[in-house]
Amino acid sequence: MLAKDTACQYTLFYLAANTEVSEHTSIRNDTVSVLEGRGFLTLSGEEIELEPGVFIFLLANAPHALQAESNLSFLLTLSEKSTDIN
């Protein structure tokens, strides 16, 4: 974890090539900002390609999984769930 306050948690994630994180959910909203590498995020059944520069917003409780094709790093931000998302 890089930093944490009462509203957000910031974590630098690294997945080695050919590894995966099985489907799960989070009680918080998440953002994923890909820094390097390639892979896929499956979000509510939809496959999204991950590559540097990709930014993804995930609503709380959305089922998602990750798969790294090459060494993959991204900034994960967890934020408090809000009912007013625009």
Image (tube, rainbow, N blue to C red):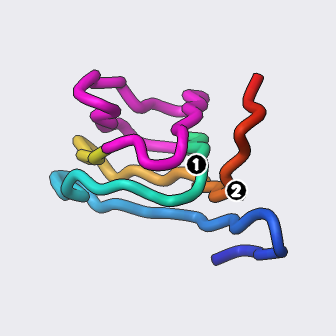
Left or right: 42 with respect to 57? left
Left or right: 14 with respect to 17? right
Q: Amino acid at mark 1?
A: Asp
Q: Nearer the viewer, residue 21 or 70?
A: 21
Q: Quadrant of residue 35?
A: top right
Name the residue at 58% across, 34% down: 57
Quarter of the rendering occupied by the C terminus: top right
Q: Nearer the viewer, residue 20 or 83?
A: 83
- Where residue 17 sits in the image (x, y, percent)? 23, 54
Question: Is 23 drawn above or below residue 16 in the view shown?
Answer: above
- Where residue 34 sits in the image (x, y, percent)? 54, 41
Left or right: 53 with respect to 69? right
Magenta span of residues: 36-63
Q: Quadrant of residue 49?
A: top left
- Where residue 51 sits in the image (x, y, percent)? 45, 30
Q: Which mark is residue 66?
A: none
Q: Which mark is residue 79?
A: 2
Q: Is residue 58 magenta?
A: yes
Question: Is 28 drawn above or below residue 4 in the view shown?
Answer: above
Question: Is 23 drawn above or below residue 85 in the view shown?
Answer: below
Residue named by callout 1: 30
Q: Which element carries disc 2, helix, strand or loop? A: strand
Q: Nearer the viewer, residue 19 or 27?
A: 27
Q: Nearer the viewer, residue 71 or 30?
A: 30
Mark closest to the chain's N terminus, 2 or 1: 1
Q: Amino acid at mark 2?
A: Ser
Extreme residue in the front direction: 83
Q: Quadrant of residue 10?
A: bottom right
Q: Is residue 9 magenta?
A: no
Please say if the residues under marks 2 and 1 sit with CB atoms less than 8 Å apart.
Answer: yes
